[in-house]
Image (cartoon, rainbow, N blue to C red):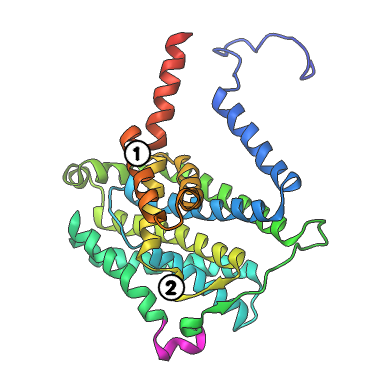
Amino acid sequence: MSDLGSSAPWPAGAAARPKVGARTIFFGLLLLVAVTLPFISKNFFIFQTTVVMVYAIAILGLNLLIGVNGQFSLGHGAFYALGAYTAAILMETFGLHYAWTLPIAAALCFVAGFLFGLPALRLEGVYLALATFALAVTTPQLLKLSPFEGFTGGVQGIVITKPGAPFGLPLNSDQWLYFLTLAIGLLLYWLVHNIVHSRTGRAFMAIRDNPIAASSMGVNTSLYKATAFGVSAMITGVAGSLGAIVIQFVAPDSFTFALSVQLLVGLVIGGVGWLPGALIGAVFVVFIPNVAEEISKGLAGACYGVLLILVIYLAPQGADGVIRAAVDRFKRLL
């Protein structure tokens, strides 16, 4: 038996020796950079990068609903808030370890998303957008109500204790939360990728492209639509719980309708339906407002709007379209 380093030919009957694709090499290098980054960067940049990954997870969940299943949502900030408050209340009120808050938030947000998706089955297009818009607007007000103030902290919110690295690992809190968020983000990306390329994902896309044809082929459109809403809310809720732990604070005014718009902007910038675009969209959402503020503090909102219009005008299909066009041009040059 020859060893792995030998030059023996590939076994007879095989079509060809498998090759490592350029995409695999690229993601391998990207992962290597991601693992190295916390050891060569300052704590504040590590914190910012962790926030980017949190938003990327939330945008990934929204992409599953809009890009893959074709349902429109302006209310995913509500599920983000539900996940954040679940983690905060369980940690600070009930003393639960932060690791247990993540699966609990995921389960709670899945149920909430699934139940919201059931009545929303009768709605499509702008009507579904209005329903989710109402959800986003209502959620911060509910968190301020006096009956819930003992748990939510009312308008003052909840301060969360920042967890340290477990098992005596030689990492500070920022580095540990970075690696925790990275690991969960990769796990959720793997989950969504497998869903998209499974029978369930094909059913999601069939409903998106032609719900009548999908129904005539035996696809239970009601069940799949509600499931898509539930899984999307679950992923966004996990992002919310991670965001609460990383930022160490939750308050109702942190989860206004603007948050839902930010997630939608990140989705469009990254590319609707393109899963890796969630990270690019998150970078835009986190850093471009800072760039706009540096341009003009008094007109930061206007500068942000102009930058957003320019990006959409130059790249109407988001980062997905830009990268595909660049790859096609590179292939033609070869």
Image spot of residue 303 (x, y percent): 39, 49
State left or right for residue 101 relative to residue 280: right
Q: Quadrant of the N terminus?
A: top right
Quarter where residue 122 is shown:
bottom left
Residue 124 visible somewhere in the drawing: no
Q: Which residue is mark 2?
A: 253
Residue 110 drawn above or below residue 40? below
Q: Secondary structure at mark 1?
A: helix
Q: Secondary structure at mark 2?
A: helix
Magenta stretch: dominant SS? helix
Q: Amino acid at mark 2?
A: Asp
Q: CA distance from mark 1 to mark 2?
A: 29 Å
Quarter where residue 117 is shown:
bottom left
Image spot of residue 252 (x, y percent): 44, 75
* Magenta stretch: includes residue 109: no
Residue at 41 percent across and 26 percent down: it is 324
Residue at 31 percent across and 36 percent down: it is 313
Residue numbers of the magenta segment: 144-151
Q: Which residue is mark 1?
A: 310
State left or right for residue 179 relative to residue 236: right
Image spot of residue 294 (x, y percent): 50, 50
Of badges 1 and 2, the one in the foreground is 1
State left or right for residue 191 relative to residue 198: right
Q: Residues within 10 Å of mark 2 (few under 14, many from 20)?
A: some
Q: Residues within 10 Å of mark 1 (few under 14, many from 20)?
A: few
